[in-house]
Image (cartoon, helix red, strand yellow):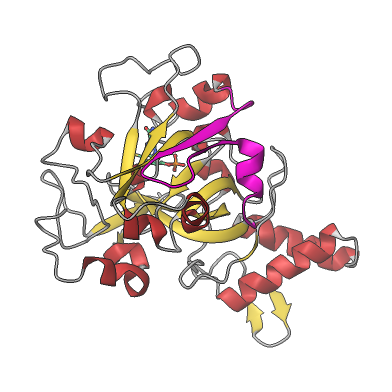
């Protein structure tokens, strides 16, 4: 089907890999208009279909969590958004099993309410936030980030949340705080694979303070305009778009400010394979495979081409300065 747009002539909604931001924003405006009942039926039909094709419409499976337009540079990747179905059924969340299909099947038991997040360690204002208070702490934004898994596949997901920096400013870290450590839920009663020997539990992740403060680091409560499904790390997770996916801990219950580099789950399991930094870097191979290219989930046909992996997953302009002068082969 061909769609006529006012200034671009004819485009085919399904053939384009890239969605220019302007076009994407206009789609969102149309969707918002539709939600307000202001658009005509014909418009509603094509805008709705376009939105579904882009995966940006609310799937309607969970409570709405709309995000405003983000002003953060690099917050919107213009690749085609991955289908919600793929993003919510092809997951890694080892607390619910090691197969990609396991989290969607098993994470129904995760108890996400009530939920609290403890903030402690080297801060002036330690606090225990209820999820509700944490959600209200700053305005929700929508960010479309590539998620590049260390295994060599990637997705493009519209997340909803706010910069981790907003929370950090509220708790006022001491000068001695050099790292932020993220502890995730580890409840053997509701998470069937906690206790399995594949990793040490809880799943712990960490960032250097300047990485945690970078505006791209997103404290995330939703995706595709809704609260997170359990398998994607409900009710609150981190998304660090320039690092391999495993740096983005799911179902966070505690955040600790510390002066020591945190011992992280995958680093403890295989230190020679998973470094503390784990920045997406096509020039530094994993000891067992190349990281130069990736397979985009949803493009798995027999003839689907692999994509070149981008330095810092495409966020070089925003984050390269964090690593100035560092040997990224040594600090992998
Ligand atoms: N967080 C916890 N608590 N447990 C995990 O097993 N897996 C990580 C990360 N966060 C993981 C986790 C890995 S390896 C990846 S690639 C991403 O979550 C996957 O996120 P997604 O399933 O939402 O795409």
- Tell whether 52 sits left or right of 157: right
Find out whether residue 289 is within the magenta segment: no
Q: Nearer the viewer, residue 166 or 296?
A: 166
Q: Is residue 308 above or below residue 261?
A: below
Q: Is residue 56 visible?
A: yes
- Tell whether 79 sits left or right of 34: left
Q: Residue at x 83, y 68 (%)?
A: 43
Residue, far bottom: 7
Give the quarter of the figure containing the N terminus: bottom right
Answer with the quadrant where ligand 1 appears in the image: top left
Find out whether residue 117 is within the magenta segment: yes
**Residue 128: image x %, image y %?**
54, 35
- Tell whether 155 sits left or right of 281: right
Q: Is residue 219 above or below residue 79?
A: above
Q: Nearer the viewer, residue 226 or 276?
A: 276
**Residue 291: image x %, image y %?**
21, 55
Q: Nearer the viewer, residue 43 or 262?
A: 262
Res 92 → quadrant: top left
**Residue 330: image x %, image y %?**
9, 56
- Tell whether 171 sits left or right of 9: left
Residue, far front: 124
Report the span colored magenta: 111-139
Res 262 → quadrant: top left
Q: Residue at x 64, y 85 (%)?
A: 8
Q: Is residue 89 visible?
A: no
Q: Is residue 4 above or below residue 113?
A: below
**Residue 229: image x %, image y %?**
58, 36
How many circles with numbers are drawn on the protein?
A: 0
């Amino acid at each position: 089907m061909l769609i006529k747009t006012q200034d671009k002539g004819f485009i085919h909604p399904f053939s384009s890999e890239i969605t220019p931001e302007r076009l994407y924003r206009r789609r969102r405006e149309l969707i918002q208009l539709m939600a307000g009942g202001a658009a005509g039926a014909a418009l509603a039909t094509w805008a709705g279909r376009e939105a579904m094709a882009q995966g940006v419409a609310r799937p309607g499976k969970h409570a709405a969590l709309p995000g405003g337009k983000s002003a953060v540079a690099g917050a919107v990747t213009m690749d085609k958004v991955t289908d919600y179905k793929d993003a919510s059924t092809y997951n890694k969340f080892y607390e619910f099993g090691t197969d990609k299909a396991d989290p969607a099947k098993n994470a129904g038991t995760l108890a996400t309410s009530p939920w609290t997040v403890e903030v402690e360690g080297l801060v002036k204002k330690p606090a225990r936030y209820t999820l509700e208070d944490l959600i209200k702490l700053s305005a929700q934004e929508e960010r479309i980030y590539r998620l590049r898994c260390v295994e060599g596949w990637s997705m493009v997901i519209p997340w909803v949340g706010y910069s981790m920096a907003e929370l950090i400013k509220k708790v006022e870290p001491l000068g001695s705080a050099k790292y932020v450590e993220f502890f995730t839920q580890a409840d053997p009663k509701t998470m069937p694979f906690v206790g399995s020997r594949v990793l040490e539990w809880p799943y712990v992740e960490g960032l250097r303070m300047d990485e945690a403060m970078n505006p791209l680091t997103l404290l995330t409560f939703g995706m595709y305009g809704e609260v997170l499904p359990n398998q994607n790390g409900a009710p609150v997770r981190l998304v660090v778009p320039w690092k391999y996916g495993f740096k983005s801990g799911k179902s966070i219950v505690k955040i600790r400010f510390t002066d020591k580099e945190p011992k992280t789950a995958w680093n403890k399991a295989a230190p020679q394979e998973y470094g503390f930094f784990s920045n997406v870097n096509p020039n530094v191979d994993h000891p067992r495979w190349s990281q130069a290219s990736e397979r985009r989930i949803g493009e798995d046909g027999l003839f689907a081409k692999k994509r070149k992996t981008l330095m810092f997953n495409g966020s070089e302009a925003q984050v390269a300065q964090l690593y100035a002068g560092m040997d990224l082969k040594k600090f992998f």
